[in-house]
Amino acid sequence: MAELICLDCGKMYSSNELRWKCDCGGLLDLIFQLKFDPSKINSAAHGMWRYRDAIPIDADQNILSFREGFTPLLPLQLEEGLLHVKQDHLFPSGSYKDRGASVLISKAKEIGVNRVVEDSSGNAGCAIAAYCALGGIACDIYVPASTSAGKLAQIQLYGANLHLIPGSRQDTSTAVLEASEKTYYASHSWNPFFFHGTKTFAYELWEQLSWKAPDTVILPAGNGTLLLGAALGFSELAASGCIDRLPRIIAVQSQHCAPLAAAFDNGADTPAVVDVQDTLAEGIAITNPIRGKQIIQAVSQSGGLFITVSEDEITAALLEVSHKGHYIEPTAAATIAGAKKYLNHHSRSGEVIASVFTGHGLKSTEKLLKLASEH
Ligand SMILES: *Cc1c(COP(=O)(O)O)cnc(C)c1O
Ligand SMILES: [Zn+2]
């Protein structure tokens, strides 16, 4: 059984404790020494659970799954060049957060949790609520009052108790802290099991690119739940001898909320204090990402960089992919806007570049109706 370790003081805990942070307040990661054996891939299991051996759930009977994952990898020809795009907007709850929620809520079930709390800018709340519905686990979701209506409807219809918090995303995080004193905090940013779900993004890419890692992967960075999961997955594949080098990680932030890009550009290793403004990319508008240091480290160690995108660039990317028949939410378009910039300024010929559609357009009807009427 894997153990939890504090990133600040090194204290260890059993992963079967109902615990989401260290007694010292530090972040926990999982110690999970994995030697992944590709011959153990269960191709009969169509989705992400085909990598069952790589996922730290002890007993199969605790697995909560909608047969999600193994999302199609699509060649996408943009004005600036070719991208290989994982269609993670096609998950059951409409975003890649299902990767993390499937593993995290399975673990919650395994350790006997019957009620969880979670805070989110929307999609993580949708995903946690969906898997709690599947597992018969009660669930309270805290979101900013400004969250897209589509996401609010989804959370409520899955049967979760929805708490609308006035103010910023940070105010929502503060509001959930009191609740997390008494109830298991199924946090997608604190809880390391979430990242052992999002890491399947890397495994799938590797399998779909005929057992090779891409040269470069372009991912969003708010709390970094996909970015850090992908970095974890690629490092496990490298440690298991499945790939011989790690892809470069390019992290995309909105210019209106870019504490990590600012830190990276100044050579700092923790998130910068920045002015923030409203952005179309509501899902990555994170002022103080708690795993910020890990995100900056993962990007630097991979030889990657940060790219910021403006509201106009997000809109242009959204319109371009929509006109090709892909319906994604504005937050997802921010990553594609970053990919367009990368292709324009940084890419080399022959470089294999992967990216992702993180969330479905149907979640953001109001914002997209507004854009449709303006363009
Ligand atoms: C959660 C999310 C992201 C990125 O998430 P972080 O974990 O904050 O980096 C990107 N796009 C969509 C649609 C999301 O829901
Ligand atoms: Zn500690």
Image (spheres, rainbow, N blue to C red):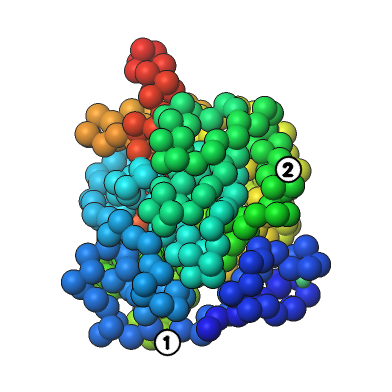
Q: Residues within 10 Å of mark 2 (few under 14, many from 20)?
A: some
Residue 171 showing in the rendered view: yes
Residue 28 vs 122, above or below: the answer is below
Q: Give 271 or 262, whichever is nearer the viewer.
A: 271
Residue 25 vs 234, above or below: the answer is above
- Which quarter of the rendered picture does the C terminus lie within? top left
Which residue carries the number 1 mark?
35
User: In whole angstroms, how far apart are the C-alphas of marks 1 and 2?
Assistant: 39 Å
Whichever of callouts 1 and 2 sits on the residue coming sooner in the sequence is: 1
The kind of residue on which mark 2 rests is Thr
**Element type at marker 1?**
loop
Q: Residues within 10 Å of mark 1 (few under 14, many from 20)?
A: some
> Within the image, what quadrant is residue 297 found in?
bottom right
**Element type at marker 2?**
helix
**Which mark, residue 174?**
2
**Which mark, residue 357?**
none
Residue 220 vs 107, above or below: the answer is above
Q: Give 93 or 232, whichever is nearer the viewer.
A: 93
Residue 225 position within the rendered picture, expressed as x and y whole percent measured from the top left = 52, 56
Left or right of residue 73: residue 185:
right
Residue at x 49%, y 41% (from the top left corner): 160
Picture quadrant of ligand 2: bottom right
